[in-house]
Image (cartoon, rainbow, N blue to C red):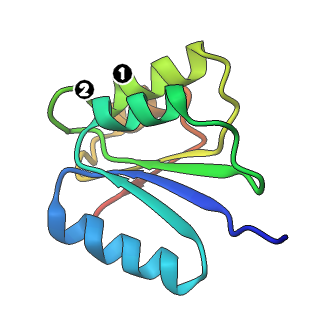
Amino acid sequence: MNFPMEVVLAEDEENLRSTLTWAFERESWTVRGFEDGLAAWEFLAAAPPHPEGRVLVLDIVMPRMDGLELCRRIREAGMDLPLLFLSSRDEEMDRVLGLESGADDYLCKP
């Protein structure tokens, strides 16, 4: 059985979350969307490994748990998943903090 890659998307902006979900699903990826970091963390902490793997796309500014804290928890738990920050925070220091917290890449929202 062939399973699509799973994207865990933590983004508090509903319109952007639904647009990204549509785009990933159009490429046949499964999307688990969350409106805050804590909900994404609870899912990841309890979820069994996905057969084809997971990638994480996280916003930084979110309610209940921000993306930086979520990223730190993921890395401290030993989860070696590809992780991308997609954030409106576009200062150089924000990028440095994101990468130092364990992200593999950092993209600024237009």
Residue at point 52%, 28% (across, down):
46
- Image position, residue 82 (x, y; %): 64, 45
Q: Is residue 84 above or below residue 44?
A: below
Question: What whole-number distance in Å separates the C-alpha atoms at marks 1 and 2?
Answer: 6 Å
Image check: 92 left or right of 63? right
Q: Which residue is mark 1?
A: 69
Residue 90 visible in image: yes
If the image is split into quadrants, where does the C terminus sit?
bottom left
Give the number of marks. Answer: 2
Q: Nearer the viewer, residue 27 or 71?
A: 27
Q: Which mark is residue 52?
A: none
Give the x, y percent position of residue 98.
43, 32
The residue located at (27%, 41%) in the rendering is 91
Circles 1 and 2, Cβ within 8 Å, touching? The answer is yes
Quarter containing the N terminus:
bottom right
Residue appearing at x 34%, y 34% in the figure = 67
